[in-house]
Image: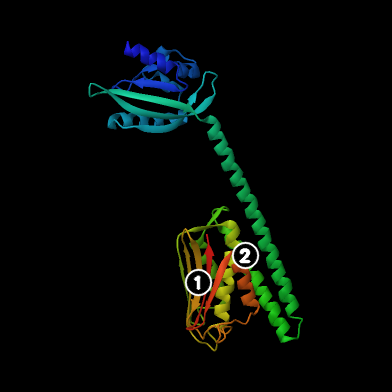
Amino acid sequence: MPEVLFQELADDAPIMIWRAGPDKLCNWFNHLWLEFSGRSLEEERGVGWTDGIHPEDRADAMARYSSAFDARQKFSMTYRLRRYDGSYHWLLENGAPYYKNAQFAGFFGTCVDITEQREAHDLAVKALAERDVLLREVYHRVKNNLQQIIGLITIESTTIADPEARRVLEALAGRVLAMGAVHHRLIASASFVDLAVADFITALCRDIARSAGADGRGIVLEVDVDGSSIDIERAVTLGLLVNELVTNALKHAFPRERRGTISVIYRATDAAIVVEVADNGVGFPQVAEDGATRRGTGMRLIEGFAEQLNGRLEIDGSAGARIRVSIDE
């Protein structure tokens, strides 16, 4: 009587249900399973049901099934099963051991058709991949355009006699070059959703140091970045901020062949992101005795980038120079 009651209840359940004995052979399937497969209970019993598993999924599915039986542990897996119309559908299967009189009696299992969810996921993954290809091409073209702009600025600077005007153009070319370097690193990144900060900032600082000839000048650039990631929209501004901070230190901290160290630190917590660039050079020339700053072009850019990131700017010129930007998360 209990067996009949169970089968009646299971047949009315809105989910595919199966049962197997301790020998791993299936001995019962509910009505919804048989309706899905289009086969009779006799055809599905034993290992008959495995005929419907997609050939590419069969070995793995059976290995997981057998391993769970041997260990008498719950299992969960996905595989494709042939429907009555010949099409293959993705199923999510969960199985668990059951006992009678404290003795292992076999497994019960359920299956849910997840084909629609799987196809939606695959479409989303494909769409993201296509978007990444498009964005990579956009960043590549932007980088190439920036290189052309640098070339035009450089050519124009050679025609100007005024040293100050020429210096301004050269500084502008350097900042455009920095933008190109940021886009180059974005092209090389694995994702256009989140960017690994350690790889990004480390590579960017290496590019800046190489461009400035830091090694030949005896300047050591130390980069200490945690393993967090940042969204791609803020990554560009962050890269430009770091570029301006490091470039300024390389230009102003070590005059007259002075040697020294520049440190770049990045830390991210649930509460805030902290970006800090410090050096042991001659000190920050734009910090007056009253703590006020003379806002040159570089400092205005740094303030602008910090504002774009919703960050707070702190400047310490008491020993060398230390600039910190704290960004609330």
Residue at horizontal 35 percent and vertical 24 percent from the top: 108
* Residue 317 placement, left or right of 27: right
* Callout 1 touching callout 2 (CB < 8 Å): no
Task: Where is residue 18? Give x, y as percent.
Answer: 39, 21
Q: Amino acid at mark 2?
A: Gln
- Asked which secondary structure carries label 1, the reply is strand
Relative to the observer, which residue lies in front, 301 or 37? 301
10 Å crowding of disc 1: few (<14), some (14-19), many (20+):
many
* Residue 295 placement, left or right of 227: right
Task: Where is residue 285? Give x, y as percent.
Answer: 57, 85
Query: Does 316 sit above or below residue 43?
Result: below
**Which residue is denoted by mark 1 in the rendering?**
276
Q: Quadrant of residue 28?
A: top left
**Which residue is denoted by mark 2 in the rendering?**
308
- Asked which secondary structure carries label 2, the reply is helix
Query: Does 254 sit above or below residue 24?
Result: below
Q: Residue furthest bottom?
A: 256
Task: Where is residue 65? Give x, y as percent.
Answer: 36, 29
Q: Amino acid at mark 1?
A: Glu
Relative to the observer, which residue lies in front, 59 or 195? 195
Q: Residue furthest front?
A: 290
Task: Where is residue 299? Give x, y as percent.
Answer: 61, 76
Residue at horizontal 48 percent and vertical 25 percent from the top: 81
Q: Quadrant of residue 74?
A: top left
Residue at horizontal 22 percent and vertical 24 percent from the top: 102
